[in-house]
Amino acid sequence: MTDQYAVIGNPVAHSKSPLIHGEFARQTGQDISYTTILAPLDGFRDAALEFRDMGGKGLNVTLPFKHEAWNLVNERADYALDAGAVNTIKFLDGRMVGYNTDGLGLVRDIKDNLQCPIRGKRLLLMGAGGATYGVMEPLLHEQPGQVVVANRTLDKAVRLAGHFEKFQRFAAHGVSVRPYEVLGSAQFDLVINATSAGLSDEMPPLPDAVFAAGALAYDMVYGKTTPFLRFAQARGARIADGTGMLVEQAAESFFIWRGMRPQTAPVIARLRGEG
Ligand code: NAP
């Protein structure tokens, strides 16, 4: 029988996950179906359990349910534990195991696809929402030189840094929190925009000199050249949107469910309209 998977969210119609997992299944010859589930805002738990009870094998979870999914599962694996968010659920003999593959997806895209090592680099991470929580631990495990977290609402960045205190030692020069306004003349090799500002064609207020020579500017928002990416490009930085992260986090989910690693490059190219 065909194994059933789905992405659950609200809204969810825009999700690229059915296309991505459809490509992975075709490539690897796996017999799966992958659909979308629009759950009511107060109905995540019921919808997820109904899918499981109908024989579903796994779910991807998107906004705004990642924290509810973290609460729902019986076990939290790897990076899900500290992220406080689950984006992948595997239904296994009556148990629900939760994973967070967003951070691994980001790290793979930066290191492998974009060939930009993170170790020793000066990293500016913008944002302190769910996406930042998801990527913080995997980024710190890459042993960057220095990490600065900036956020419009400073309190949230302070809370985030405190939450990940036990991992701060992985960054050679530690993790600090700064408002955008006091970044001053500090320069960074890797600037990651984990805010949702780009969705509304805005960007955090960055100083002009923020990009070191050869810096990579990465926006987790995918499918568009955001104001942040335009700003970075105009100042000589390399730029990347979040398409690669999206596909890599999906590949990690596929591996968790099916035990196989699909090729991501052709799927990234297809999403970018190049394939
Ligand atoms: P969230 O929890 O709502 O957090 C939003 C963050 O953006 C907050 O830190 C917020 O600052 C900041 N922000 C929003 N508008 C801003 C503006 N105009 N100027 C400065 N800061 C602004 O959202 P999230 O779940 O973290 O998601 C963030 C983004 O990551 C989304 O756009 C999502 O699409 C993307 N994402 C992509 C992938 C992928 O696979 N590519 C995966 C996960 C997430 P305040 O705290 O001050 O409000």
Image (cartoon, rainbow, N blue to C red):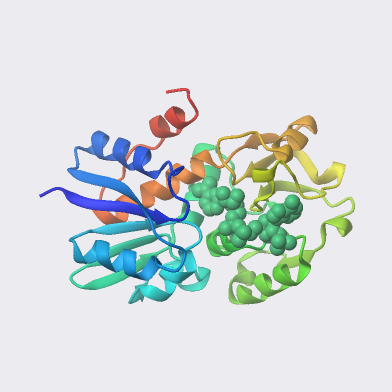
- The image shows residue 83 at horizontal and vertical percentages of 52, 68
On screen, 163 above or below 41? Answer: below
The answer to whether 124 appears left or right of 99 in the picture is right
On screen, 192 above or below 223? Answer: below
Which residue is located at x 47 percent, y 51 percent? Answer: 11
Snapshot quadrant of residue 16: top left
The answer to whether 200 appears left or right of 17 in the picture is right
Snapshot quadrant of residue 131: bottom right
- The image shows residue 7 at horizontal and vertical percentages of 36, 52
Residue farthest to the left, as pictured: 1
The answer to whether 80 appears left or right of 4 in the picture is right
On screen, 174 above or below 180? Answer: below
Res. 37 in view: yes
Q: Nearer the viewer, residue 130 or 260?
A: 130
Which residue is located at x 68 percent, y 47 percent? Answer: 190
The answer to whether 208 appears left or right of 16 in the picture is right
Q: How many marks?
A: 0
Q: Nearer the viewer, residue 12 or 239?
A: 12
Q: Quadrant of ligand 1?
A: bottom right
- The image shows residue 124 at horizontal and vertical percentages of 72, 54
Which residue is located at x 47 percent, y 22 percent? Answer: 274
Residue farthest to the top, as pictured: 274
Which quadrant does the C terminus fall into?
top left
